């Protein structure tokens, strides 16, 4: 892909954009100087929450510096957070934690031109249709006059402003909370962005004063087939199976719950609640959701994760992840494609494979598991 092929793609795209209701004027303003972004594709290949080991990711995401900055933000914006919590019913620490993860509390909002990033991804990515629909949404924002095309900036993936809203989410959910007539998620004042984030979480069903999850300790002989997103039980049933909270407190009941093992059977275990799945609407990587939830807890004075991580295990590189997905699918355990991201479908396939061999079915994609699977046959 080069600048020329991007221009070819854009000329075809213009017709689709017009059909979707984008005016020639807007297209002229927004697309004229759009350039191909190599850096966007490079970043797309190296997403930290999918390629870094969970414990390395959490160390950086929930560092002491970020916890301290989050506590400061909670004080500085106390009145605003009071109003947001009252209006949307979303706990302040989650809004602040997302702000911390997405832009380091507004310090790193991203300066990649959103339209160029989305055009590059739409023209080259296997999820091109998704990025094209976000590109159309970005053009609608320009057309509506919320911001000039040049002011539309953010991350390599098209996410914008303090809490990194995608354009389609901006269109449907961003709010003008300070009442100045503009929904401004890009400027220095985080008011609209934080309220918009709360509106987003509320829309997906956030339940106030309910935990995202808690760290637990599993009993000896726990059936690891019960871990993962397929088995949901009331807390009382998990308790009856011998699940206890890590530390000295009682296991809280925040609705139906699942067991999550982000570092495999040897790492910390969590009982996750419906609010965990609400945060997934922001970013569905387990590492990200855990980081948001845990950072929120720490900002409010909660303690660290107690169970040590199996730091001797090597996580898979992206290429090894793709290889694992090919090998599992070839062995009859469908991973629903091979993109190197170890999501729920791959974890479930891995669990089924581990069960078939009599291994602990924790669904954890370590380098060791590859050695149990025959190499991928070349396509004929
Ligand atoms: Ca405003």
Image (spheres, helix red, strand yellow):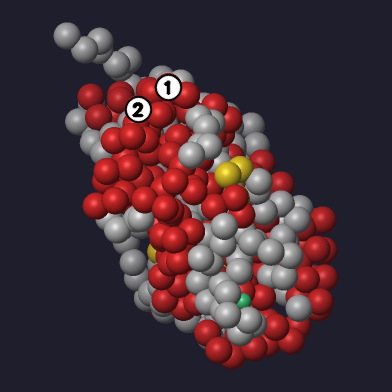
> At 66% across and 41% down in the image, what residue appears?
56
**Residue 199: percent from the left, percent from the top?**
50, 77
Q: How many numbered discs, if any?
A: 2
Q: Which one is nearer the viewer's eye here, 58 or 94?
A: 94
- Reading the image, the residue beneath label 1 is 4
Question: Under tag 1, what secondary structure?
Answer: helix
Q: Quadrant of residue 132?
A: top left
Residue located at (48% from left, 59% from top):
142
Tell me, yes or no, if residue 217 can be seen here.
no
Q: Which quadrant, please, contains the C terminus? A: top left
Direction from residue 333 to residue 222 in the image, left or right: right
Q: Distance between the residues labelled 1 and 2?
A: 6 Å
Residue located at (32% from left, 61% from top): 231
Image location (x, y in percent) of residue 172: 41, 70
Residue 8 badge: 2
Residue in front for this viewpoint, 37 or 51: 37
Apparent side of residue 55 relative to residue 351 in the rendered image (left or right): right
Q: Is mark 2 on a helix, strand or loop?
A: helix
Viewer can see residue 184: yes
Q: Residue 149: image x %, image y %?
A: 54, 52
Disc 2 residue: CB within 8 Å of ligand 1: no
Residue 8 position, x and y percent, is: 35, 27
Residue drawn at the location 53% of the way across and 37% of the way down: 33
Quadrant in which residue 143 is drawn: bottom left
Q: Residue furthest front?
A: 25
Q: In which quarter of the image is the N terminus?
A: top left
Contact (Cβ within 8 Å) of mark 1 with mark 2: yes
User: What is the crowding at mark 1: few (fewer than 14 residues within 10 Å), some, or many (at least 20)?
Assistant: few
In the rendered view, tell whether residue 220 sits above or below residue 318.
below
Q: Which residue occupies the foreground of this view, 361 or 200?
A: 200
In the rendered image, the residue lying farthest to the left is 380
């Amino acid at each position: 892909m080069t600048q020329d092929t991007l221009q070819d793609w854009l000329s075809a795209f213009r017709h689709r954009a017009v059909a979707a209701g984008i005016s020639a004027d807007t297209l002229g303003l927004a697309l004229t100087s759009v350039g191909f972004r190599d850096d966007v594709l490079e970043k797309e290949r190296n997403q930290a929450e999918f390629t870094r080991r969970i414990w390395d990711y959490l160390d950086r995401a929930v560092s002491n510096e970020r916890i301290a900055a989050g506590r400061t933000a909670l004080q500085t914006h106390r009145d605003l957070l009071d109003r947001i919590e009252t209006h949307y019913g979303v706990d302040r620490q989650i809004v602040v934690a997302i702000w911390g993860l997405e832009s380091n509390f507004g310090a790193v909002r991203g300066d990649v031109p959103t339209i160029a990033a989305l055009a590059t991804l739409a023209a080259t990515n296997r999820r091109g249709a998704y990025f094209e629909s976000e590109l159309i949404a970005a053009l609608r924002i320009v057309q509506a006059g919320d911001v000039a095309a040049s002011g539309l900036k953010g991350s390599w993936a098209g996410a914008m402003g303090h809490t990194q809203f995608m354009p389609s989410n901006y269109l449907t959910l961003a709010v003008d909370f300070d009442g100045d007539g503009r929904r401004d998620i890009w400027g220095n004042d985080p008011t609209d962005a934080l309220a918009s984030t709360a509106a987003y979480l509320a829309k997906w069903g956030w339940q106030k004063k309910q935990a995202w999850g808690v760290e637990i300790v599993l009993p000896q002989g726990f059936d690891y087939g019960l871990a993962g997103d397929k088995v949901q039980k009331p807390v009382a049933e998990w308790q009856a199976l011998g699940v206890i909270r890590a530390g000295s407190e009682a296991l809280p009941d925040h609705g139906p719950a699942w067991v999550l093992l982000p570092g495999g059977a040897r790492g910390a275990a969590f009982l996750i609640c419906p609010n965990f799945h609400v945060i997934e609407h922001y970013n569905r990587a387990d590492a990200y959701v855990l980081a948001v939830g845990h950072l929120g807890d720490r900002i409010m004075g909660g303690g660290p994760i107690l169970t040590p991580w199996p730091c001797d295990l090597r996580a898979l590189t992206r290429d090894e992840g793709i290889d694992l997905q090919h090998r599992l699918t070839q062995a009859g355990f469908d991973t629903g494609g091979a993109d190197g991201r170890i999501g729920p479908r791959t974890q479930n396939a891995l669990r089924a494979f581990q069960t078939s061999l009599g291994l602990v079915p924790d669904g954890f994609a370590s380098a060791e598991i590859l050695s149990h699977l025959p190499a991928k046959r070349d396509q004929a």
